[in-house]
Amino acid sequence: VQLQASGGGLVQAGGSLRVSCTVSGSIFSNYIMAWFRQAPGKEREFVASIHWGGGDRYYRDDSVRTRSTISRDTAKNMVYLQMNSAKPEDTAIYYCAARKDRTRVTSTDSVTQNYSYWGQGTQVTVSS
């Protein structure tokens, strides 16, 4: 499985950001797709995950869930993250990741080490 993130750029605070992940190779319905982000000087952190087959979602916390949507298009092999009401603290490199052999999303999706596949990341900068 190969992942390629795209769509980053400069966003005004209060605006919306949308990043995309192109998935290539063999991906099956029991995969979890996720978005992580890493701000300068900080550890990589989980943002959201989605089950490729069932479409159920899991978010980092309420502050992310209330203004974000993770989605996937199985026909196009794409995963998306849209985040509204962007804040300067959303500035980071956004990475897509995949883990396999999962029946549903769980809190273990937040653990970086559980993922076997990573994209190269796309920079998002939110200006105040």
Image (spheres, rainbow, N blue to C red):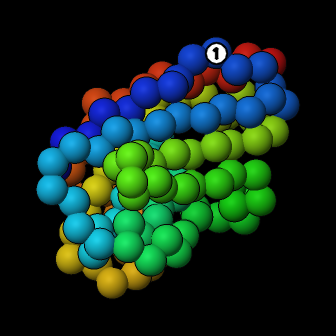
Quick one: quadrant of the C terminus? Answer: top right
Of all residues shown, which one is farthest toward the front? 75
Of all residues shown, which one is farthest toward the bottom? 103
Residue 20 as seen in the image, left or right of residue 63: left
Identify the residue at image location x=57%, y=17%. 9
State the image coordinates of residue 59 (x, y, percent, origin top left).
Answer: 58, 64
Residue 18 as seen in the image, left or right of residue 44: right
What is the three-letter code of the residue carrying label 1? Leu
Identify the residue at image location x=38%, y=66%. 52
Question: Can I make out residue 103 in this image?
Answer: yes
Question: Can I make out residue 42 in this image?
Answer: no
Residue 15 as seen in the image, left or right of residue 28: right
Identify the residue at image location x=39%, y=54%. 75
Residue 88 as seen in the image, left or right of residue 77: right
Q: Total of numbered circles in the picture?
A: 1
Identify the residue at image location x=57%, y=55%. 70
Closer-to-camera residue (55/119):
55
Q: Which residue is mark 1?
A: 10
Q: Quadrant of residue 12?
A: top right
State the image coordinates of residue 74 (x, y, percent, origin top left).
Answer: 39, 58
State the image coordinates of residue 2 (x, y, percent, origin top left).
Answer: 19, 42
Task: Give SS at disc 1.
Answer: strand
State the image coordinates of residue 105 (x, y, percent, origin top left).
Answer: 43, 76
Q: Quadrant of residue 88?
A: top right
